[in-house]
Image (tube, grey):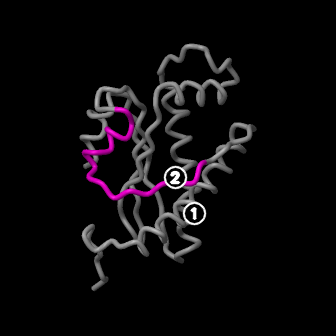
Amino acid sequence: MANVIGIKDINSFHLDVLKEIGNIGAGNAATALAKMLDKRIDMKVPQIRVMKFSEVSDVLGGAEIEVVGILLGVQGDITGKIFFVLDMRSATILVNILMGKNVDEELVFDDITRSALQEVGNILAGSYLSALSNLTNLRIMTDVPYLAIDMAGAILSVPG
């Protein structure tokens, strides 16, 4: 039986390891996004915090803020979920760049827009998990991405 580390068992060493894995994974994802957009992507060093899922909406600006959420299941040697959350302005800019439109153009969330956001989530998750897989020698894959556009509190109430 594998050793299971509970949230109360996480110490500063674990957080440092998770931060480094996050940094490498996020770097791979940023590189993939830069190639997809044919634009330079600047990335901040990832932060890591252990918190309840219900507290995440506060980090995003509050439960009432409208966001785009992309949820992907993780399977293989590890299981879990990856959840990308974009504020509406960032989602609009991202899709408009992908579609070759002016970044300030109003975005209609139709089937094509939703599909583009799901694919971005899929590519970013795949890049991130590929780095994690290479670092750990674990077999890690994602499921089909699900997309929701709603208030942060509503979206974040589903996966938890």
Across and down, in percent, residue 16 comes to 48, 69
**Category of crowding for the residue at label 1, using alpha-carbon neighbours closer than 10 angstroms: few (below 14), some (14–19), many (at least 20):** many
Residue 101 sits above or below residue 62 on the image: above
Q: Nearer the viewer, residue 34 or 53?
A: 53
Quarter in which the N terminus is drawn: bottom left
Q: Which residue is mark 1?
A: 130
Which residue in the rendered view is the most extreme toward the bottom?
Answer: 1
Report how far apart the C-alphas of labels 1 and 2 lie in the structure: 8 Å
- Asked which quadrant contains residue 154, the reply is top left
The segment highlighted magenta reads: 44-61
Mark 2 Cα within 10 Å, few/some/many (few <14, many 20+)?
many
Whether the magenta-drawn stretch holds residue 77 is answered as no
Count of numbered labels shown in the rendering = 2
Q: Amino acid at mark 1?
A: Ser
- Residue 44 is marked as none
* Residue matched to label 2: 125
Q: Residue at x 25, y 45 (%)?
A: 54
Secondary element at tag 2:
helix
Q: Foreground residue, 37 or 19?
A: 19
| Residue 68 percent across, percent down from the top left | 42, 32
Judged left or right of residue 126, residue 5 is: left
Residue type, numbered disc 2: Ala
Kind of element beneath mark 1: helix
Q: Nearer the viewer, residue 113 or 5?
A: 5
Q: Residue at x 60, y 31 (%)?
A: 94
* Residue 55: percent from left, percent from top: 28, 45
Mark closest to the chain's N terminus, 1 or 2: 2
From the viewer's perspective, tell me whether residue 125 is left or right of residue 13. right
Return the residue found at the far front: 12
